[in-house]
Image: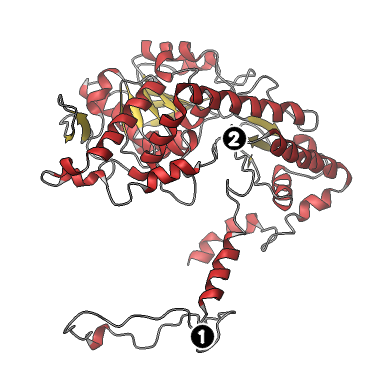
Amino acid sequence: MELIFEKSVSGRTGVRVPLSDVPNAAPLPDELRRREPVRLPEVAELDLVRHYTNLSRRNFSVDTNFYPLGSCTMKYNTKVTENAGALFASCHPMVALLPGGDKLVQGPLSIVYELERQLAEITGMEEVTTQPLAGAHGEMTGIMVIAAYHKARGDEKRKYVIVPDSSHGTNPASAAMAGYEIVTVPTAPYGDMDLDLFRQAMNDEVAAVMLTCPNTLGLFNPHIAEICAIAHEGGALTYYDGANLNAILGKVRPGDVGFDVIHVNLHKTFGTPHGGGGPGSGPIGVRGDLVRFLPTPRVVRREDGSYAVEDHPEGIGRVSDFFGNFAIMARAYAYITMLGREGLVEVSEQAVLNANYIMARLKEEYDLPFDQTCMHECVFSASRQVQNGVHAIDVAKYLIDRGFHPPTVYFPLNVKEAIMIEPTETESKQTMDAFIEVMLEAARLAKEDPERLHEAPVTTPVGRLDETRAARMQQVCCE
């Protein structure tokens, strides 16, 4: 296939390659040389800069637009924490693995150690490891720790993990990858996992119960302590999916209500970058007898106050290279240290206030399956708009035209035509009001001119895609 470069002009260049400064360099063998010159666009430096700058302006990001993805907690990344991460660009704790290397990286080692202490205090856990590279990776690590615990006790008959039907998809996926079978408990009319059905599902073959609290409907389960107690009575462990931890910072510690394991998404709760394929970070915390099964090695503080790296023979081994994505951890450490307890409490209070404000303003035009005070996010349904042929996806596409990133749609799966909105704590009332007006505008168009919504987006470089055809054509395209 012939390559066509629209901006390329023959003979134009934006770079000058310096002459080799390697003395007596050996010539490249003929068999390693290209048969034909590489086809690259010929452009000036200014053309190149403008090309990529204009491409970047087509992106949605938290820095440029309101980004209300529900359950993803797309927090603003403060620039002071970005600077904190950059400070360690040339100083990584992996140097500690070299002979005597721990003396050279006491600063980075102290950050790993202190961040683990901070996260343990915030979540009510005994110990934390920062090794996992993402939330789902943390889930997998947590389930592996749970499996190691049961195996060490000789209790290998446990083969089930219970999840609610509103869980994140990674919960059953992580448990299944660890070899467990999944038992799904439906949501009760009050919006949380049905307590009676959960009791029926519990038996001595259940290894763990995985829960998000607040759940993906944005509701805090008032029976959460009772659920943990029931699980423990049956010999199972309880796993807290920390995706929605932003709603309860400084208010509730999962360990205090009975959870044994937790993963924390640093990007969702502690202001580190989110999306773009990484880097991520999903530390896990455990309590009680689970501590000895944490991944190894771990950072310890000696009696003289210095830091070292130690292996722990009973641990499940490494789940990543050393201590995960350290620059992300440095950002989270700066975020937590900067805000302190009072600041973290304010984060959760403002996030909950913002979500309830949006819920109160929109519930007259969009169905609200569970009409009660929400936490960090609110979940609507576009079922009313469907009566006029408008679906949640149409509302989402229209928001793009009006300058807003769409909220999450069609999740959680137990809400038809779901629209999940999470504003986070940093958005102003003015920004939320502008978003609300566009949502109300979309509701009016659904009644008066639904075709406008079917055509959206019309302001983007690429218009409405045929997503159904794209899904069906995957195999053909990949062959």
The residue at 15%/44% (across/down) is 101
The residue at 35%/24% (across/down) is 120
> Does 352 sit left or right of 294 as displayed?
right
Instruction: Examine the image and state in which quarter residue 237 appears.
Output: top left
Q: Pinpoint residue 346: horizontal percent, then vertical percent.
A: 55, 24
Position of residue 41 relative to residue 416, above or below, is below
Sequence-earlier tag: 1 or 2: 1
Depth check, front residue: 169 or 47: 47
Question: Element at badge 2?
Answer: loop
Under mark 1, the amino acid is Arg
> Which residue is farthest left?
99
The residue at 48%/52% (across/down) is 276
> Does 448 sit left or right of 72 as displayed?
right
Give the residue at mark 1: 12
Position of residue 382 relative to residue 373, above or below, is below
Depth check, front residue: 427 or 278: 427
Instruction: Examine the image and state in which quarter residue 140 appears.
Output: top left
> Does 464 sit left or right of 350 as displayed?
right
Q: Label 1 vs label 2: CA separation?
A: 46 Å
Depth check, front residue: 113 or 375: 113
The residue at 39%/16% (across/down) is 203
